Amino acid sequence: MKKISWLVLVILFTQGVSAQEKYVTLFEQSEGRETPIYSEVIQYFETLANDFKEVKMVEMGITDSGFPLHVLLFDRQQIFDPKKWHEANRLVLFINNGIHPGEPDGIDASMMFLRDILLNKIEIPENLAMAIVPVYNIGGHLNRGSFSRVNQNGPEEFGFRGNARNYDLNRDFIKADTKNARSFQQIFNWLRPQVFIDTHVSNGADYQHVMTLISTQHNRLGGKLGEYLENELNPQLYAKMKDRDFPMVPYVNAWGGKPEDGWSQFKDSGRYSSGYAALHSTLSFMPETHMLKPYHLRVASTYALFETFMEILEKDGAKIVASAKADRSNQISQSEFSMNHTIDKSSYKTIEFLGFESGQKPSEISGLPRLYYDRSKPFTKEVRFYDTYVDGLIISKPDAYLIPQGWFNVIENLYRNGVHLVELKNDSAISVTVYEIKEFQTAQRPFEGHYLHSNTKVEKIQTKINFRKGDFMVPMNQEVNRYIMEVLEPESEDSFFNWNFFDTILQSKEGYSAYVFEDLVAEFLNRNPDLRNKLEAAKSENEELAKSGSAQLRWVYEHSPWKEKEHNRYPVYRIEKMD
């Protein structure tokens, strides 16, 4: 495997590339100071696709900007069909760029990386098939300037974090509010990659490292892939990047503290790209270069990371393919699924951190103490890294879920994510487990277009419900069972319920006129002395209830057959055992 050190790359970038002038990028022409506009990015990749038979560019889906989403497919065998790739047990790598267009490092690195593969400057695994999204957030890339990341050290102009509708696309992988995310879901589940890389740039603390890395949380990933990631892949990535003069540390998740005091691994739940990919049993990574480092070094480190992956995939590709295949197959028979993981602070490892001494000094603005980092005082220190997460919730898998056809937004999301649904052919009365929503908290401020729920608690009820022809059954014998459980179980932190898909059930639609209902309640309690006794007991335990006639009417209504069954009844039902 060939190695190109960052020093050689920098020399190439600053002096120009003479071998193939046709394929020199704007980044190289500008000596590492500029990144191309959207049309130039697409034109560059179109040129490669036109000139090399190993590359095919396809349009898959639309984005909120009105532009289509492009996917570059690379295959030495010129078989541009992911289904055939998987039938042949081939390794599929998916690289996504420009989710935050103010962070264009991956765009420029991917342009040069694919070119150098095609020009045989880089060795790649023989069995590799690769897909690249040149620019995912097209709307943000078109919103171009130098204003959106005020502290960033280059390039001269770049895009904006929000997409055409001002969504942060790296919060949209479960809820899929945007056309971008809906197209991405279709692409991802068409490719079904074993390895996924989503390129980013980090802010936060100042330190010496150019590249940091978010590997998906290995406990959440689980299975053979989780074990391989923790024990083999991550150690190789860090060792080989150090050999390439880009020593890495995990993403410096030290907000509110000092990095030298250690930090916890970033928990990438399903709303984030790497967490979403993990739900589909995919090794997933978010490389995060440091925004304060010069742009040419950031791009060079991303290029070096791509090279490092090639070297590891050459050696371990067959193992990765086999592990992913086994993990996905095991989803079919797995009986319990863990979610809502929490950090275990009793377990940690030590890592080498290259930092700068930090301190406090008076602010020139306010006169109050402010944080600063002294770059004249670098240090190397072993710090604690907490990267063990434990199960917060374990839920047994039903044999199937049932979803009434009216919840089409849920059904469409499942289809896009490769879930197999069976349409009921006849009206049917089916015994199911029903969840009644008993508790939840709702954020007081909006987050990406939603007021998120959290700490949801449910109560289970066994009953028989009449389902209609055209309602949908989700059999739980699928390779995507993990994804299904995470989005359909309301207590899951990134469930469709917590993302407000079902908020209409949280508001009652019917009621009563108190002066009429008084007489009905009196008659009803006379015919139901057990309920009257329960009311009296409730009054004895609750002084406010005892003093309020209207509250007592409400209490009886909530415990009566008049109470609307739809209120707080979660409309996704569990069939625990199929007949």
Image (tube, rainbow, N blue to C red):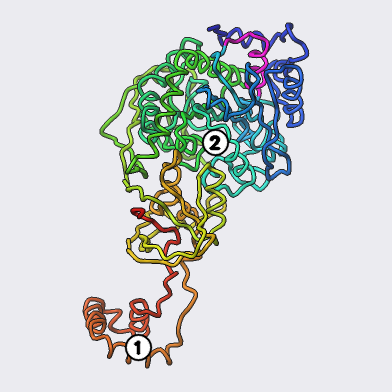
Work out whether residue 138 or residue 463 is closer to the camera in this orientation and state it.
Answer: 463
Is 61 displayed left or right of 7 in the figure? right
Is 113 colored magenta in this rendering? yes
Quarter of image, res 98: top right
Q: Position of residue 168 (x, y in %)?
A: 58, 43
Q: Nearer the viewer, residue 156 or 179?
A: 179
Q: Count numbered badges in the picture.
A: 2
Neighbourhood count class around disc 2 (C-alpha, 10 Å): few under 14, some 14–19, many 20 upward: few
Instruction: Report the amino acid beneath label 2.
Output: Glu
User: Mark number for residue 464?
Assistant: none
Report if residue 269 is visible in the image: no
Mark 2–mark 1 distance (CA, rounded to whole Å): 70 Å
**Contact between labelled residues 1 and 2, with CB atoms less than 8 Å apart:** no
Mark 1: few, some, or many residues within 10 Å (few <14, many ≥20)?
some
At label 1, which amino acid type do we have? Val
**Residue placed under numbered mark 2 in the picture:** 364
Q: Is residue 159 visible?
A: yes
Residue tagged 1: 521
Please report the bounds of the magenta region as a residue range.
Answer: 108-123
Vertical placement of 369 versus 522: above or below? above
Q: Dot 1 lies on which element?
A: helix
Secondary structure at badge 2 equals loop
Residue at the spot 60% in from the left edge and 44% down from the top edge: 182
Q: Quadrant of residue 30?
A: top right
* Residue 85 position (above or below residue 137): above
Q: Quadrant of the C terminus?
A: bottom left
Percent x, y for residue 320?
44, 22
Compared to 480, does 25 lie above or below?
above
Q: Earlier in the sequence, mark 2 or mark 1?
A: 2
